[in-house]
Image (tube, grey):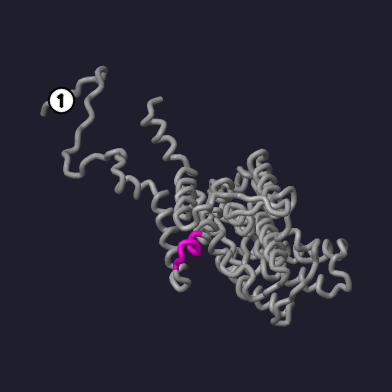
Amino acid sequence: MTTTSRWRALTHHHLFWPVAVLIALLLVNVPFTPDFFSINMTDGHLYGSLVSIVLFGSPLILVAVGMTLVIATGGIDLSVGAVVAITGALTCSYISDQADQNTLSAVFLAMGIGLVAAVVCGLWNGFLVARMGIQPIIATLIIMVAGRGVAQLITDGQIITINSEPYRLIGGGYWLTLPFSVFVVAAVVAVTVALTRRTALGLLVESVGGNAEASRLVGIRSTRIKIMVYMFCALCAGIAGLMISSNTSAADGNNAGLWIELDAILAVVIGGTSLLGGRFSIGGTVVGALVIQTLTTTIYTIGVPTQTNLVFKAAVVIVVCLLQSPKFRAKVFGAKGPKGPRRDAAPVEPAPAADAAPKMEVSR
């Protein structure tokens, strides 16, 4: 294999451009922050810009992983931001009512209540989509709109603050010198990859997204698969809600997880998963989420004005998506595709076969 063919194979890999953009974004920060790549040990904990990117990007990675499986079935989930708010509100509300907020049993029970509520939201979404046949964007829009109101009802429209060291460990604590949230994300990603790539579950999800009716005809229970992935997506959003509320030791029903659903969808698309459903990539989604979080960090590092940071973010995302488009790369970088027949060319009749019998003329 020549160097050219190796380079061509590398650039055609679905992770090449997301990783290339991630590296480019990291390098952009160096002129503005010379010690951007330095990692220091303070009080037994690792600190640095790279550690912060992973720490603050952990909730987005979780939500994006769940969103990947939903999109792989040909659906979408716009309710994950509201599920984040509901989970954080329920958990912090229960902990705040305890006489001793550091009691492990109370913290675990509060987390269980929040996660059960998240799974119920996912079950509702899956029921509307798979059983009732409602379009996913409409079905999940219900909780997206109503969920914020539910979260504010739980908190009485106030920001609930807590002081619980065990609960703070989830999103703001450290373990083995690394943020504890990194281990949570690694565990969720590892379990997801194991279930979707080491078992037949991944193929079932892709088949439902590719053609749900054909999957049903061959005996695959597409309804059950869809309900399951929506429940899993909501569970991931619930864990992200625990992280966000834990990191701030507060529950904000109005702003917690705001617009995280859009960042999650962008992360999935950047990772190479098609919004039409079918094949998906968990690794690509993780890279896509890191690209989004690195972009957010870069915006603040280089001093982009606050009123224009969303425009800057959208421009970078458009560039990433264009670089992933084969048609765009063919036009810009001059890649030649297969040529079809010219429309103005005269049709060419096929040559007769060698053993074809001669035509007989009938005389009149």
Mark 1 is surrounded, within 10 Å at the Cα level, by few (under 14), some (14 to 19) or many (20 or more) other residues, namely few
Q: Amino acid at mark 1?
A: Glu
Q: Is residue 202 located in the magenta-colored stretch of the structure?
A: no
- Image quadrant for the N terminus? top left
Quarter where residue 204 is shown: top right
Kindly give the residue lying farthest to the top in the view shown.
355
Q: Indicate the secondary structure of the residue bearing disc 1.
A: loop
Q: Is residue 103 left or right of residue 243?
A: right
* Residue that appears at 75% across and 63% down: 168
Q: Where is residue 337 shown, x and y percent of the image?
A: 31, 40
Q: Where is residue 183 shown, x and y percent of the image?
A: 70, 50
Q: What residue does disc 1 label?
A: 361
**Residue 166 or residue 13, whichever sits in front:** 166
* Residue that appears at 31% across and 44% down: 333
* Residue that appears at 88% across and 73% down: 99
Q: Where is residue 311 shown, x and y percent of the image?
A: 43, 67
**Residue 192 or residue 58, whichever sits in front:** 58
- Residue 113 in the image: above or below residue 340: below
- Image quadrant for the C terminus? top left
Is residue 266 at least partly visible in the picture? Answer: yes
Is residue 73 at least partly visible in the picture? Answer: no
Quarter where residue 308 is shown: bottom left
**Residue 57 or residue 148, whichever sits in front:** 57
Q: Is residue 300 located in the magenta-colored stretch of the structure?
A: yes
Q: Where is residue 186 shown, x and y percent of the image?
A: 67, 48
Q: Is residue 306 left or right of residue 243?
A: left
The magenta span reads: 298-304
